[in-house]
Amino acid sequence: MKKAILALMASVCMAMAAGAQTVYSCDYRSDADVKVYVANYKSDADLVVYKCSYKSDATGNNGLWYFVNYRSDAKKKIFFVDYKSDADLVIYFTNYKSDAGWRNKSKQHLMF
């Protein structure tokens, strides 16, 4: 019985970690899954992003990102571009977790 409970708990934890929006910032454009431009205004963004302090806070695909130190730990690898025209996704960093979310849902597939 104890083994069954431990196995269930382990699978729940792994499922939660799999849904986490962990992100790695690449040094090279060719290594990235998504090219990202950081907008100065929230109204220009496809996605409003809140940088989480803890990996466990970065759940789902709703703009709660946790930046990891290693590529292998990331769900998505991104490269920050200098020009909006070069970007696949335009984001705006917010200081408030409640502001995070998609403004342009047609680009939501980029972060799955």
Image (tube, rainbow, N blue to C red):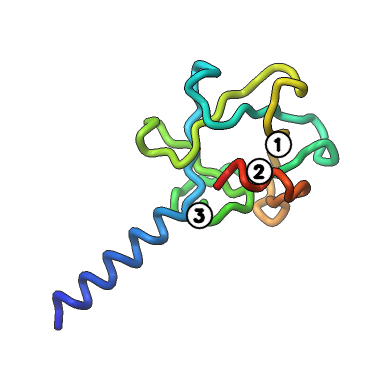
Q: What residue is disc 2 on?
A: 49
The quarter of the picture where the N terminus appears is bottom left
Q: Position of residue 64 (x, y in %)?
A: 58, 49
Left or right: 70 as drawn, with respect to 2: right
Taking the spot 69% from the left edge, 56% from the top edge, the residue there is 98
Identity of the amino acid at label 1?
Ile
The residues bearing labels 2 and 3 have C-alpha atoms spaced at a distance of: 13 Å
Left or right: 11 as drawn, with respect to 105: left
The residues bearing labels 3 and 1 have C-alpha atoms spaced at a distance of: 19 Å
Q: What residue is disc 1 on?
A: 91
Q: Is residue 2 above or below residue 58?
A: below
Q: What residue is disc 3 on?
A: 57
Left or right: 69 as drawn, with respect to 76: left
Task: First in sequence, mark 2 or 1: give its number.
Answer: 2
Element under label 3?
helix
Identity of the amino acid at label 2?
Val
Q: Is residue 27 above or below residue 110?
A: above
Using the image as rendered, state which of residue 67 and residue 34 is in the foreground: 34
Q: Residues within 10 Å of mark 2 (few under 14, many from 20)?
A: many
The residues bearing labels 2 and 1 have C-alpha atoms spaced at a distance of: 7 Å
